[in-house]
Amino acid sequence: MSPLKPLRRALRRTLWLVMLRRIVAWAASAVILLVAGSLVAGWVGDARRVNLSLLLAVASSLPIFLLWPVPERRILDRFRQLDEEMVFEAYLEAEVGPVRELLRSLAENRASALALATLPREPWTQGLRGLCLTALLVLGLGEGLSRLVRGRSLVFAPEPPVAASRGERIEDQGFSDFATEDPAARRMRREQALERAESGGSSQEGARSYESTGRGSASSRRAPRGYDEPEEGPDSQASVPTKPGERPPEASAGGERTSSTPGETPGGKGGKPGEGPAPTGRASTSQPGGESTGLRATPGRTGQGYDHTGDTKVPSPLLDYRARFESRYAERTGKRLAASGRMGFGELREFQRRYFESFALQVDVGPGDDPYVSLLKKRWADVKGVE
Amino acid sequence: MKRPALPPPLAAVVAVLTGGLALYGGVAWVERILQMGPISGAVLEEAGKGLVILAFGWSGSRKPALERRSTQRIRSRALGAARGISLGLVAVAVFVLAENLAYAEAFSEAGILKRLLWSVPGHLTAALLEALGALHLLRRRDLIGGLLAGGGLILAAAWHAGLNLLASGPLGGALFAGGSLLASLSFVMLLFLFLGHAYLGGFLHGAD
């Protein structure tokens, strides 16, 4: 048996304990920093960004606590605590020779005793205890201050989760792509679809040509992603096989109607979602006023015209716009927009109008002017009181 | 046994901050200039980290040994190397922190917190592989030590490049969870391996 094996095991346990205490110290420091940061972040411009950076920095600093050099003094103190008669130390200090062999036998005896002995506990240091108490104190103070000043809990109701729900709703997923897509590519695809619809003639002919090219096969048929994919509109309607109880394909005849303004964005010339005839194959079944209908498929009436948009799995753009508005509202005001809130219906309408309205409605924009720059100039003039 | 002197904490803090930030700045600059990919970027970062760790370890171990006995001198040098390499690892942790903050500045969204599970343990596992190699090199100071140090560096670069390649592609939930778990477990295991080798091995050097 190696004389130092029990000693090594005991010292390894000390190292574990050192790491554990460092984790506790890090956690206490993290609490202090995060609470202080949350309180200060309210005074800084972008509180969410500050909180996120602080959280990332604090969490990333755990390895620094763990990897900082272990003080040799700590190990040496423990070493001497375990070796009161200094047998191990004498053995380690001895040069190679007969004395060392003699000390080795003594060290072996001591090691066997150490293996059976109950090791003395290592007390918590005063500094660590003080740090933990400080963290608790700061947490309590921060919570109290937050409730007093901001009227909400610091721990249980932090900053409103602006982006937390982003991507959870199908509306966000579908129309986020639409919003970020290159408009030139969208326009080109729209024009191609228009040409195809025009060259296809009637919807039945279009349906035949669609099926003959194999695009109507189940494998290639995918759910439309938004307004910008009109090829999924009339053509896909025509490709749906007629079933008993359904209207014939002629009745839906979405081809001509769809070709008028597919892919128009709100505020554009083609009108807003919910205005004018809704094209087939779109998710937008919205009525003026923001209400949407037909998001669920109606059994027995699948795939025909305006009433069956639930089957297309296209999300409603108005729901997306509302979600975006709610997100921006919560981001700027720190309040959640809820049906049970204090905001009146008219006030909500006014906010939505101001958020979504076209810049061109407020300023006179020349043919070569940038609407955004013109609006900024007008607002600057309003602020400065210049006509 | 002579009680070793404690390192001046403030000097150590300044040294690791300087080392970590300089490493981040240098690596980011070279990667931007040369437009490096995931593999070449990983190799560059690991080479930089290995150099920093070795430099800190060497500076720790070259302290003049005043001990009269040879066993004491060896032990003192081993503990000095362990302390220096630990500071080098802290400099790498500063590098990782700076990188995380840079990412948070560029992509200020909650998804950036995923880096804490994937990137941080990945970086530190690679650094610990290099630290173990550097420890052998500084203790042995021979060809075998050099080979072990080189092996640690190659392993670290391969590990980092593998993680980079995985992250470059579609990183599914299961793959992310598995990779994060593997990296975290590797980090904890290598941390205690390093602590045992560097500190306990330093104290009990030559006795087994």
Image (cartoon, coloured by chain):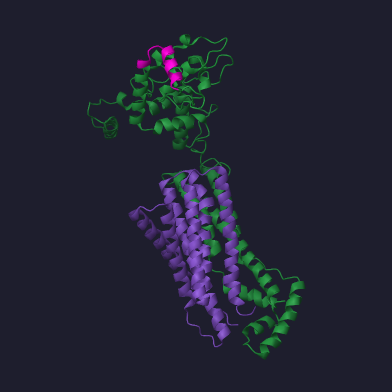
| Tint applied to chain B in the drawing | purple
Q: Is residue B62 left or right of residue A121?
A: left
- Is any part of residue A278 visible from this angle? no
Q: Is residue B51 left or right of residue B201?
A: left
Identify the residue at horizontal 41%, vertical 22% (top origin): A230
Q: Which residues are magenta?
A: A198-213
Q: Residue furthest front?
A: A212
In this rendering, the answer to whether A149 lies above or below B38 is: above
In this rendering, the answer to whether A45 lies above or below A289 is: below
Picture coordinates of residue A224 (x, y %)? 46, 25
What is the magenta segment's predominant secondary structure?
Answer: helix
| Tint applied to chain A in the drawing | green
Identify the residue at horizontal 39%, vertical 13% (top origin): A256
Pick the residue in front: A214 or A268: A214
Residue A203 magenta: yes
Pick the residue in front: A320 or B138: B138
Q: Is residue A292 left or right of residue A86?
A: left
Name the quarter where the N terminus of chain B is drawn: bottom right
In this rendering, the answer to whether A63 lies above or below A104 is: above
- Is any part of residue A385 visible from this angle? yes
Picture coordinates of residue B143 (x, y %)? 49, 75
Q: Residue furthest bottom?
A: A98
Identify the residue at horizontal 60%, vertical 78% (top origin): B205
Picture coordinates of residue B100 (x, y %)? 46, 53
Pick the residue in front: A33 or A303: A303
Picture coordinates of residue A85 (x, y %)? 71, 82
